Image: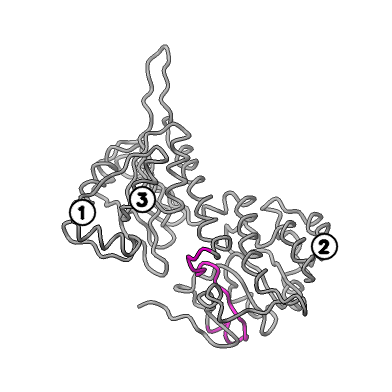
Amino acid sequence: MQIGIPAEILAGETRVAATPETVKKFVTLGYKLVVQKGAGVASSCIDKAYEEAGATIAATAAETYQDSDVVLKVAAPSAEEVSLIKQGAIVLAAFAPHQNENLEAYAARGLTCVAMELIPRITRAQSSDILSSQANLAGYKAVLLAANEYAGMFPMMMTAAGTIKPARAVILGVGVAGLQAIATAKRLGAVVEASDMRPAAKEQVESLGGKWLDVPMSDEEKAKALGTGGYAWVPSAEYVRDQAIIVDKAVSAASVVITTAQIPGRRAPVLVKAETVAKMKPGAVIIDMAVSSGGNVEGSKLDEIVVTENGVKIVGIGNIPALIATEASALYARNLINFLQPQHDKESQSLKLNRDDDMVKPTLIVDGGQVLYKKPN
């Protein structure tokens, strides 16, 4: 059975879906690996390393796709790539199915599409969770981007000419990316505050040295938030009002703000209003990590740096993991092989997806010519 790893053609996508490390593991399992020439160069994976791991290098995308029963990608196949893929092949990628316009084209080609971002949050699926692995790196890189754009310094510094005060960083959204952002900002010396809809996140924030921005909650609201894990509960109008006041006060005084809140399949919630940005000091920096799904910050623009009238920079980079492609590719590639190894049939040395597996079933958006994914209204 052949596995193909094509070069990514999406603008700005520097990652690759398999590294020499994972290629070697696939070869050991009995698969033939074909990697498109130059596919891993931006991720520090050169063709020679792939060959030494047991792969064959193909000169073009067409040669990579034509006989590959399984295709590993980072971004979903574009309309022009679909026609190159072998009829009936299995394709693993981050498909963004809620906004993908090619689902019917995949079905017409008889493909089976595995959307890796739909991996369920269950214990045995953690090693295959691309959202967590990439968000972890993105949270780290977001702080470095902020430090680069910020004209001041993160740590407090005492000099003969006077004392430099530490930067004040506010992190909105304390998931995987947010927690890594807190840890990184603290390591750089900033004073960090953070907020999240989940009351349980308070302990995590404080364990990393951050200050929790506490929003008063009734006992009923606490029960709802704890019972749903914090994301599915609907807050009261009073809670929303109180949260807005607290966020406005913290963000207005911040040197750096990083927003991370995203809802799979839906537009990102607006956390920072334009009137709050207008209160910030000149030189302050906001990194909107949700800009690709609509943005958490009013005024942010995809893949642009917006400078407001009061001198605040709003940075909207849609694909932060691609800026650290070496490690992002290494983790993504491991996520894929961790997902596929349990589906490997030793007797036939081939891949046989178990459609009833509770780790596989939620990821199947197209299967054998049928679109299974239902876009949310």
Q: Quadrant of residue 168?
A: top left
In the rendered image, the vertical position of residue 100 relative to residue 334, given as above or below: below
The numbered mark, 3 or 1, whose residue comes first in the sequence reads 3
Can you give x and y, in whole percent of width and height, for residue 236 in the image?
19, 61
Q: Is residue 139 left or right of residue 263?
A: right
Give the total number of marks visible in the rendering: 3
Mark 3 residue element: helix
User: Comparing marks 2 and 1, which lies closer to the viewer?
Assistant: 1
How far apart are the two marked residues, 3 and 1, measured between alpha carbons?
14 Å
Question: Which of pointers 2 and 1 lies earlier in the amino acid sequence?
Answer: 2
Residue 367 image-quadrant placement:
bottom right
Image quarter where the N terminus lies is bottom right
- Residue occupied by mark 1: 217
Q: CA distance from mark 2 to mark 3?
A: 45 Å
Amino acid at the residue labelled 2: Gly
Residue range corresponding to the magenta coloring: 104-123
Q: Residue at x 64, y 50 (%)?
A: 326
* Nearer to me, 220 or 320: 220
Residue at the spot x=80%, y=59% of the render?
Answer: 53
